[in-house]
Image (cartoon, rainbow, N blue to C red):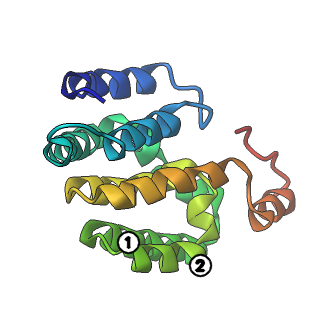
Amino acid sequence: MELMDLPHMSTFLKHRVQCLNGPHARLPEYIKALVDDVIHIEGEDSEEKRTICTRALCQQLSDNFDDTYFLVAVSLTARRFPNKHTEIQIEENVSKLSAAAAFGSATAFQKYSKTTDEVWAHSSMLGIPLHAAAKEGQLHIVQIITKSLDRVYEPSKKEKIMYLKADRPFPER
């Protein structure tokens, strides 16, 4: 990744929102590619370049958080999970994930994420901890989150059952 590529991320993130096609948007893959590029910087002064790129990338993710589709899930939670108790549980789990992400604790983040199928059921739920990690410059947590986004495209069994019981079609991914 070249340092001059980073300013274009802001434009890309805003563009993704305008031409968004639901969770099919390629934003998670784009962020994942950027993280991989930063991690694999080699050559002379590579450690310094990685540090600069990490700060710049995390700053871009943090600055553009409100302009990405990740935040959508907060408003969707009540509609997707009509049970108020489930909604509160999800919010608590997202808060725990966000705190672990901000502190850079991969162990705590992975511990909470294993018990949080509802959070992973929709990729936008991961935007809140992603933003927390990026804001604090925790690129290793951003990497864990973007790698974990691979599992979000398949709805959980619990979520499918909830939609069947509510006699609603499952939203297309």
Q: Secondary structure at mark 2?
A: loop
Q: Is residue 75 above or below residue 84?
A: above
In this view of the protein, which residue sits in the foreground, 23 or 76?
Answer: 23
- Residue 128 lies left or right of residue 53; in this view the side is right
Mark number, residue 82:
none
Q: Which residue is mark 1?
A: 95
Q: Which mark is residue 115?
A: 2
Q: Quick check: can you spot residue 74?
A: no
Q: Is residue 137 left or right of residue 140?
A: left
**Quick check: 136 above or below 73?**
below
Q: Quadrant of the C terminus?
A: top right
**Identity, as a three-letter code, of the amino acid under mark 1:** Ser
Residue 16: x and y in percent read 44, 25
Instruction: Indicate the quadrant containing the N terminus: top left, top right, bottom left or bottom right.
Output: top left
Q: Which residue is rendered at x = 46% and y = 42% of the image? A: 32
Provide residue 98's location: percent of width, then percent of height: 35, 67
Q: Is residue 104 visible?
A: yes
The answer to whether the residues at label 1 and label 2 have Cβ atoms under 8 Å apart is: no
Crowding at mark 1 (Cα within 10 Å: few <14, some 14-19, many 20+): some
Residue 138, percent from left and from top: 27, 60
From this view, report whether residue 148 is shown above or below residue 89.
above
Mark 1 lies on a secondary structure that is helix
Left or right: where does residue 24 sit relative to residue 157?
left
| Residue 144 vertical placement versus 42 (above, below) | below
Q: Looking at numbered disc 2 in the image, what kind of residue is underneath it?
A: Thr
User: Residue 85 is drawn in which quadrant?
Assistant: bottom right
Residue extending furthest front?
44
Measuring from the top left, give residue 54's x and y in whole percent: 23, 46
Q: Nearer the viewer, mark 1 or mark 2?
A: 2
In three-dimensional space, the C-alpha distance between marks 1 and 2, rounded to whole angstroms, equals 13 Å
